[in-house]
Image (cartoon, rainbow, N blue to C red):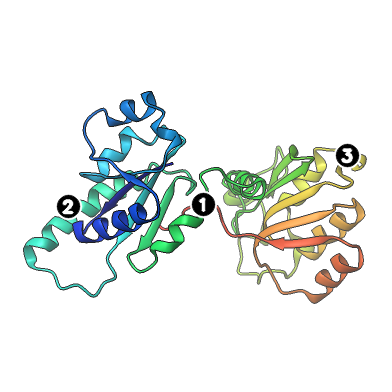
Amino acid sequence: MLFCVTSVSAKVSRIVIDHLVRNGFTEKKVFDGIINDIMKDDGWRQDIVIQLRTPDDWLEFKIRPCAVLIIAYPSGNQKVSSEEIAEYNAYYINMLKVRATFLNRTNLIEVDETQIDTIYNHRIRPTWQEYFMSLAEMASLRSNCMKRKVGAVLVRHNRIISVGYNGTSTGTTNCSDGGCERCNTNTHKGKELSDCFCIHAEESAFLERNSLEVVGAQLYTTLYPCRLCARKIIQLKVSKLYYIEEYVHDKEIQSLFARNNIEVCQLNSTVDRTE
């Protein structure tokens, strides 16, 4: 693994690097073309740490699957001069440009100098659950619903069988263009769903397959299902539900899932939302 460390504070970078070296990493000095030397000498098989000269240096390493960018933040207790503030501002402008290139956080670690131990828990390769949920989050971006964006992915044997997102039916006016009156008013979440003209993300995914293909599948959805979708999940005999955000804390839905042996698991978002 190759850890590329950057920080607005050289002192904090050094703290992180020294910590990694004490735990078995080898420090190498950065220079133009260092990644070629690392790859040529099978250095990618080793645990290596380097200190980037500027955040822009990351662009040389980002295409390599073994590389991880560590952005280390000062604890906030240090006093800084006006000259240092100007340097900090220039650094953060460059850092934000670099962070904007990340689709997700699989090769990005952001830590406070007091949280260095958490670095060792990082995985470059996402789990199956993180992978499928990231696709559900990506699908949600296609939503045209004015209330919220939701994505869903159906999976069998670690293979995607269907993807869906919420919005009005094909050939009708998009919700964002006024196609659903309920979603374009201040109707409270979970209320008057029968008046909604949007197809929910779970429904959209179900409609792409016949019912026999869905039996035993796992459902990944960015939002906990409503009662309308919960009934369909039970009827189609989905085996496991993964979700990120709570919708309404409906104890009846929870009870229905439990009585029908549908395992429910909440995951964290895989998308970096800090920009």
| The quadrant where residue 228 appears | bottom right
Residue 245, compared with residue 206, is above or below; it is: below
Judging from the image, what secondary structure is the residue with disc 3 in? Answer: helix
In percent of width and height, residue 235 lies at 92, 55
Left or right of 66? Residue 163 is right
The quadrant holding residue 269 is bottom right
Q: Residue at x 79, y 40 (%)?
A: 157
Alpha carbon distance from label 2 to label 3: 54 Å
Badge 3 amino acid: Glu
**Given contact means CB atoms under 8 Å apart, are the residues at marks 2 and 3 in contact?**
no
Compared with residue 5, is residue 185 higher up or lower down, i.e. above or below? below
In percent of width and height, residue 170 lies at: 71, 39
Residue to which mark 3 is pinned: 213
Q: Is residue 139 left or right of residue 31?
A: right
Q: What's the distance in space between the residues labelled 1 and 3, CA to CA?
A: 29 Å
SS class of the residue under badge 1?
loop
Above/below status of 65 relative to 237: above
Say which residue label 1 marks.
Answer: 271
Q: Would you say the residues marked 2 and 1 are in contact, meaning their CB atoms lie under 8 Å apart?
A: no
Q: Is residue 187 visible?
A: yes
Q: Residue at x 38, y 61 (%)?
A: 111
- Judging by the rendered image, the residue that carries numbered circle 2 is 90
Distance in Å between CA atoms under marks 2 and 1 = 26 Å
Q: Nearer the viewer, residue 8 or 191?
A: 8
Element assignment for label 2: helix
Residue nearest the observer in this picture, 226 or 68: 68
Disc 1 packing (10 Å; few <14; some 14–19; many ≥20): some
